Amino acid sequence: MSEQFTIGIGTVGAGMWFSYDSGSKWRHIQRHINPEGNVRAVCVDPGDPKRILAASDRSGLFRSEDGGFHWVPLTSPITEGEIWTLTVDPTDSNRVYVGTRPGVWRSTDGGESWEQLEMGMNPQCPIGISRTTNIVVDPRDPKTVWAGIEVDGIYRSNDGGDSWTHLSQIGPTQFHDDIHGLAVNTHHGGANIMATTPFGLATSTDDGASWDWHEFDGFDKGSGNPHAYCRSVLVKPGDPQTVLVGCGDYIPGAVGGIEVSRDGGRSFKRASLPVEANSTVYAMAMHPGVPGAVAASSVFGQIFLSHDSGDSWSKVDREFGEIRSITLSPA
């Protein structure tokens, strides 16, 4: 029998749900966190898998110390807008980054106090207000922090967020800078920065000075795009050769898929799912404490699980509304 694990999901319009038995049974979190709110960001503390952070639009930040059973609100000034991403420094659990619409906030005392960071980013983009979709603390140096912005490319800080540099355009058009997913890969000799956009996967071997592109095949139905619209990118902890990319025909899309690489992102094969994903595969999660386990969710509420790092998949029976974030951690 495969090892049991905990799955947490954040939804649009139905708050947050947790399963403590690998997806068989689900619990709707109703205390403190608005059960009908938008939870776009849920994050497991890399230093303590029982500590989980979550963010609810126009409500603020919340923390669990027992693997998602009980939740308490954190003191936070981020209570008016949308929160799109949460990241905890793997070397210092007191250092937390929050990506909002627009901007980035940082706490250095575990969420007791917060400061909005000056990035120099444009608060407006071609589709409206800019969103910080990803913040990644570089595993090679925690002072290096990467931020992906919707239709404004990638920003890098070399001093833990005190100052930022806007990287040059990563693709031939403005919407190639529409960053959906962001990851750092420690594979020597391969790509070290990976970013997903509507046009595929951008990879850099020189920390963002130059970029190569990998476009994935489109789908037989849906928008008719000749290439896949990409959302999340996930590098397996402890195995940088394994890379997964969630994709679909568009957003939210009518069909979705998962691309799997076993050579650090040089080549990919589309996974065989037990049923066709009903929309773009938006979020994915792994955890080093549960080797081989992967949780992936489509925009329109399906959850797919793998116990062998993406070679084979099953589908959770329970379906939800819109899922925007997912976590996986030891049970």
Image (spheres, helix red, strand yellow):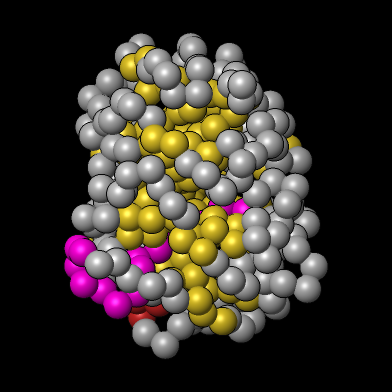
Q: Taking 205 as reference, is 59 left or right? A: left
Quarter location, residue 198: bottom left
Q: Nearer the viewer, residue 310 or 119?
A: 310
**Rendered view: 310 above or below 186:** above
**Res 74 visible:** no
Q: Residue furthest bottom?
A: 172
The mark tally for this picture is: 0
Quarter location, residue 260: bottom right
Please check the rendered image and state whether residue 133 is part of the magenta-colored stretch, yes or no.
no
Q: Quadrant of the C terminus?
A: top right
Residue at (56%, 82%) from the top-left corner? 212
Residue at (56%, 48%) from the top-left corner? 311
Q: Position of residue 117 (x, y in %)?
A: 53, 53
**Res 186 visible:** yes
Q: Nearer the viewer, residue 292 or 85?
A: 292
Please check the rendered image and state whether residue 224 is part of the magenta-colored stretch, yes or no.
yes
Q: Position of residue 262 (x, y in %)?
A: 65, 61
Residue at (31%, 26%) from the top-left corner? 318
**Rendered view: 99 above or below 317:** below
Q: Nearer the viewer, residue 126 or 225?
A: 225
* Region in magenta: 221-235
Q: Nearer the viewer, residue 265 or 109?
A: 265
Residue at (61%, 25%) from the top-left corner? 2
Q: Position of residue 204 (x, y in %)?
A: 63, 75
Q: Position of residue 279 (x, y in %)?
A: 27, 51
